[in-house]
Amino acid sequence: MFYTYILFSYKDEMLYTGYTNDLKKRVEQHKNGEVKSTMNRRPLKLVYYEACLDQQDATRREKYLKSGSGKIYIKNRLKNFWSDIK
């Protein structure tokens, strides 16, 4: 199983999208500052994830979620989250 996930940075209020085959371990790595791309963006919160059976599907989904259309999808999908942090 592979996971596409989105983290929210409380520091800069931005989203970080990635994929992994071990979601719990990867999120802990992000939270502990072990991931270069997010180490200076902590604290982080897992706000969204999807499970895929295949790595290719997860990477394809990650790429989509990073696109303009994907960002609109996530903004709408997490509508309650955005209203709670404002």
Image (spheres, rainbow, N blue to C red):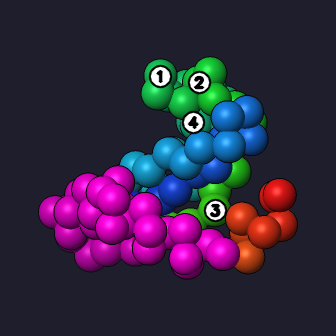
Q: Position of residue 76 (x, y in %)?
A: 55, 76
Choose the circle earlier in sequence order: 3 or 4.
Answer: 4
Choose the circle earlier in sequence order: 2 or 4.
Answer: 4
Q: Secondary structure at mark 4?
A: helix
Q: Are marks 1 and 2 in contact (CB under 8 Å)?
A: yes
* Residue where numbered disc 3 is placed: 47
Q: Is residue 86 above or below residue 69?
A: above
Kindly identify the residue that appears in the image at 63 percent across and 56 percent down: 46
* Residue where numbered disc 4 is placed: 29
* Residue where numbered disc 2 is placed: 39
- Specify whether 5 is left or right of 53: right
Choose the circle earlier in sequence order: 3 or 2.
Answer: 2
Q: Quadrant of the C terminus?
A: bottom right
Residue 65: numbered disc: none
Kindly identify the residue that appears in the image at 58 percent across and 37 percent down: 30
- Specify whether 22 is left or right of 57: right
Segment tinted magenta in the rendering: 50-79
- The span from disc 1 to disc 4 (Cα, nearest Å) is 10 Å
- The span from disc 3 to disc 4 (Cα, nearest Å) is 16 Å
Q: Amino acid at mark 1?
A: Lys
Residue 36: numbered disc: 1
Q: Amino acid at mark 3?
A: Val
Q: Nearer the viewer, mark 3 or mark 4?
A: 3
Q: Position of residue 75 (x, y in %)?
A: 55, 68
Q: Quadrant of the N terminus?
A: bottom left
How many C-alpha atoms fall within 10 Å of the one at disc 2: few (<14), some, or many (≥20)?
some
Task: Tell me which secondary structure the magenta stretch mostly adopts.
Answer: helix
Q: Secondary structure at mark 3?
A: strand
